[in-house]
């Protein structure tokens, strides 16, 4: 028998439009055209001005033959053109490809070719590396290269393109009548994974997912109207966790920052009344451990700054340090394939009365799904059944829902593997607690198998972070003739701290089973990605030559 509610009630233009974050800036520019949108040095740009510039960018690209389904790559720091690119490029129907500013020319050349970029927008700081990347391309199709300018850049970057960014915008119309995507499943951006081995994979985002993640981020944070967001997180990383679109939805202020620097961050707190920012643990640790003179006059206790942290769980010392500054830390979790964070460790009122160690333990969990993500679960990858919610049984974290990529560009095999069984497979090993919160135990590739026993590198790292001298820590497997593998600890010490490898081992012995204690300890600055994540694959190369310790 037919469903009576489906008879003669078709979807049409009156009751259904594609879901896209582009509509956020359209509404904000209509309602709040005079409100501040972008701060960058002496620049103050309103939402009305920003919307007009985005429309100019879109119409100028279309006039030059760049439109639906074409890729426009950008090599930009957190500057106003990067904010505008998140709207103007998809308004033309094109796909935004934000390039990682830390990559070498070879990797960048691969991305330009693999993504079939038709245009490239370049900041002067990165003109040199992009000139080399363009020379290394194997595709013969031409790329329109557009140079931006920035008064805050102190270097000597020379233009490498045939067109200036402002000249391009002058070709466009501020009243351009851009169109919604015909289908919200249409690609909005292309983000490449880190690619620690082999070529990186191109992760394709759709309009629906970008809008959904942006709104979820607003909900997780209770982000108010006219929030002031500081760009410490690179916008090239997962499209800045979708915050260019979230800030537009809230008619907020984008405070741009070319590079992460504690003094610049504290100055922005004081000068612009920053209310929100995001970053990897290393960013927050830099603020906690910054010299006291940089923190003078912050006065954040009455109006705390809200911060998101992802990439690793915040240790107790970081939580305590952030609270002392007047910064409220929220732990989120995700991957490039799920638009950045897609789960959150929701904090409860009752946690406030607990000691910092217990709060750190609870906050270390990756938590529950974002409001608008359908589900996060811990599954047995062989049976595709949820593991018992006992806090002990290990499985793989998997996501499903609208905040999940379209797939990997030109890589159907990897896409099929990633979505096997109707879930996105993260590769992160975890447990599920009785309250429904997920906690990572390790990446599958980071588990250390010593004498047949599995050792979680994250568990060992958690103990290392409890040592008062430790700024950052990473544990990897060191080959061992007897045990197969043993833990090797790489440690970055706080400024002025003095500690020996033997001290670190004794500290670990007080908190860990003997077989989990690092057999080698190496001090020095840890290699990090541009988003602050520690590059364990680099440390694995060094672990084999690390000297063992007998304590």
Image: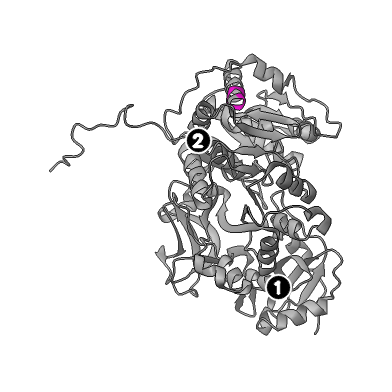
Q: Is residue 534 at least partly visible in the picture?
A: no
Label 1 and label 2: CA atoms lie apart by: 41 Å
Q: Residue at x 73, y 46 (%)?
A: 270
Q: Quadrant of the C terminus?
A: bottom right
Write the start and end of the magenta stretch as one range: 49-53
In the visual, does 437 lie left or right of 44? Answer: left
Q: Is residue 164 at least partly visible in the picture?
A: yes
Labels in figure, total: 2
Q: Residue at x 69, y 41 (%)?
A: 272
Residue position for label 2: 21
Q: Main secondary structure of the magenta part?
A: helix
In the image shown, does 297 or 88 lie closer to the viewer? 297
Callout 1: few (<14), some (14-19), or many (20+) C-alpha neighbours within 10 Å?
Answer: some
Q: Earlier in the sequence, mark 1 or mark 2?
A: 2
Percent x, y of residue 375: 43, 56
In the visual, does 492 lie left or right of 182? Answer: right
Residue position for label 1: 466
Percent x, y of residue 307: 63, 53
Q: Quadrant of the N terminus?
A: top left
**Relative to 516, residue 447 above or below:** above
**Relative to 450, residue 56 above or below:** above
Q: Residue at x 81, y 59 (%)?
A: 292
Q: Secondary structure at mark 2?
A: loop
Percent x, y of residue 154: 85, 34
In the image shown, does 38 or 137 lie closer to the viewer? 38
Q: Residue at x 64, y 38 (%)?
A: 254
**Magenta segment includes 52:** yes
Q: Secondary structure at mark 1?
A: loop
Percent x, y of residue 399: 47, 55
User: Quarter of the image holding residue 491?
Assistant: bottom right
């Amino acid at each position: 028998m037919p469903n009576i509610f489906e008879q003669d009630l078709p979807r049409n233009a009156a009751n259904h439009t594609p879901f896209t974050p582009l509509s956020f800036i359209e509404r904000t520019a209509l309602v709040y055209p005079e409100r501040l949108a972008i701060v960058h040095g002496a620049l103050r740009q309103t939402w009305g001005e920003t919307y007009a510039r985005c429309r100019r960018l879109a119409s100028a690209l279309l006039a030059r033959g760049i439109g639906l389904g074409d890729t426009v790559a950008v090599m930009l720091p957190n500057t106003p053109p990067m904010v505008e690119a998140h709207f103007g490029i998809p308004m033309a129907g094109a796909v935004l490809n934000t390039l990682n500013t830390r990559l070498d020319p070879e990797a960048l050349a691969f991305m330009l070719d693999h993504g079939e970029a038709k245009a490239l927008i370049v900041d002067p700081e990165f003109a040199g590396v992009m000139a080399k990347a363009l020379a290394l391309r194997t595709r013969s199709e031409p790329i329109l290269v557009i140079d931006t300018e920035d008064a805050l850049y102190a270097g000597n970057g020379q233009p490498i393109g045939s067109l200036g960014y402002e000249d391009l915008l002058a070709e466009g119309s501020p009243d351009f009548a851009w169109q919604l995507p015909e289908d919200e499943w249409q690609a909005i951006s292309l983000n490449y994974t880190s690619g620690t081995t082999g070529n990186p994979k191109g992760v394709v985002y759709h309009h629906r997912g970008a809008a959904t993640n942006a709104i979820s981020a607003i909900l997780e944070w209770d982000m108010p109207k006219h929030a002031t967001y500081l760009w410490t997180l690179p916008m090239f990383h997962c499209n800045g966790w979708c915050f260019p679109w979230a800030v537009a939805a809230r008619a907020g202020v984008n405070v741009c920052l070319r590079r992460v620097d504690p003094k610049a961050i504290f100055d922005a707190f004081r000068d612009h009344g920053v209310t929100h920012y995001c970053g990897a643990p290393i960013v927050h640790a830099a603020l906690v451990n910054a010299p006291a003179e940089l923190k003078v006059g912050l006065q954040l206790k009455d109006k705390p700054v809200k911060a998101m942290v992802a990439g690793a769980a915040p240790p107790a010392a970081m939580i305590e340090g952030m609270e002392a500054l007047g910064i409220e830390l929220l732990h989120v979790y995700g991957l490039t394939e799920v638009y950045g964070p897609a789960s959150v460790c929701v904090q409860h009122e009752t946690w406030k009365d607990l000691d910092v160690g217990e709060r750190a333990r609870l906050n270390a969990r990756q938590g529950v799904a974002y409001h608008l993500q359908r589900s996060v679960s811990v599954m047995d990858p062989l049976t595709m059944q949820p593991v018992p919610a006992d806090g002990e049984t290990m499985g793989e974290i998997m996501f499903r829902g609208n905040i999940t990529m379209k797939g990997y560009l030109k890589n159907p095999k990897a896409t099929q593997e990633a979505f096997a069984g109707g879930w996105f497979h993260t590769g992160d090993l975890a447990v599920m607690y009785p309250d429904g919160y997920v906690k990572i135990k390790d990446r599958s590739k980071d588990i250390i198998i010593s004498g047949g026993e599995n050792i979680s590198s994250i568990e060992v790292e958690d103990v290392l972070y409890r040592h008062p001298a430790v700024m950052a820590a990473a544990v990897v497997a060191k080959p061992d003739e007897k045990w197969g593998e043993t833990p090797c600890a790489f440690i970055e010490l706080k400024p002025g701290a003095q500690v020996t490898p033997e001290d670190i081992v004794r500290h670990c012995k007080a908190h860990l089973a003997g077989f989990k204690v690092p057999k080698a300890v190496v001090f020095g600055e840890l290699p990090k990605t541009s988003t602050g994540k520690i590059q364990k694959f680099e440390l694995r190369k060094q672990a084999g030559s690390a000297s063992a310790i007998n304590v």
